[in-house]
Image (spheres, rainbow, N blue to C red):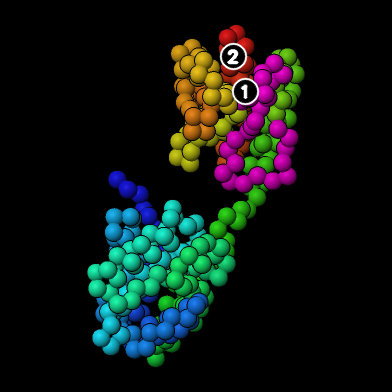
Amino acid sequence: MEGLRKSAQEVEIDHLLAEEFCCDPTFAGRFLSACQPQLFCPNFRASMAVPEPSLGGEGFGDFLVEGEAGELRVALLIEDKITASPGVRQAKRYLACAERMRGMGWDQVWCILAAPASYRGEHGEYDASIDLETVARLLRSPDLKRVAYRRAIIERALTKRATSGVKVPDLALHRMKSDYLQFVAEWCAVEDLALSFPPLRGSYYDGDSWIGPIRHSSLPDHVWLRHRLWTSVKAPAGQIDLIAKTTDAAEHERFRIERPDDAITTLFSKGKGMQISMPLPEMRQGSGFDEKIASEACRAMGNFVQWYLAG
């Protein structure tokens, strides 16, 4: 089954714009005049808004506005963006659809990008573009509460974009990794296991579940280890990986056929290498550092190193 194609904020804005075009007869004029470059179409009136229209077998658009300007049939193909990056050939697919529509009797079809002012996508490849900040100012109604409510929909989307990717340092995770790195350094010294771990960073974030790359003095440069303290949000499991970043067929075959007992072999980096993995109990910041799990991880890494060198 195909996953969700659009974010909730984009769907909300699609619905908002469709209603404005169809229910406010003056909105289309303000919208087209505010586009860059300005689209001149006096007396344009929208008659229908079609959500997620087919682009003639080349995917789907966000929505299509159909209408008239006097005796002319006019359509607007609108793509809205919040945080998503441009799709593959997205603007070209819109323009090709517009050309087909003109061949089917439409007098004018414009492809328009509606996106935040900070969006750095393919503005110049559409017929015109308009900032969502400007769209918010174009909303009109005698009911001031209604205007405020609808502008807030756009403001929430803009806020989401502004804060998207902003991470908050996780102090508990930093403390856990600090304890981990101190412990494994001491453990490896006692057990004479020549593993070198990455230095402690100044901050870590909620999803920083890896310790790596972890090197061994006898392993070649293209082979390293990592400890995944947890493997997903929901799965209560950790994992040790031995990774060989190589396309050498013989090495790939060895990872598949001769892997250690209970280890799992998978491709690494879309076939640019191979990895073998061993499950471990998870270690999360909520429960804190666990010496037993860290010891088990070091032993598993030592066993992987011995396996690789024995080949």
Residue 178 in the image: state x and y as whole percent: 71, 36
In the rendered image, which residue does mark 1 sit on? Answer: 223
As helix, strand or loop, the secondary structure at mark 2 comes to: helix
Q: Residue at x 66, y 20 (%)?
A: 220
Q: Residue at x 54, y 20 (%)?
A: 248
Q: Which mark is residue 308?
A: 2
Q: Which mark is residue 150?
A: none
Left or right, residue 113 beside residue 191: left
Q: Amino acid at mark 2?
A: Tyr
Q: Kindly indicate whether the residue at mark 2 contacts the one at mark 1 (C-beta within 8 angstroms).
A: yes
Position above or below: 276 against 28? above
Q: Quadrant of residue 228?
A: top right
The span shown in magenta is 198-225
Left or right, residue 237 beside residue 110: right
As helix, strand or loop, the secondary structure at mark 1 comes to: strand
Q: Amino acid at mark 1?
A: Val
Residue 86 in the image: state x and y as whole percent: 47, 57
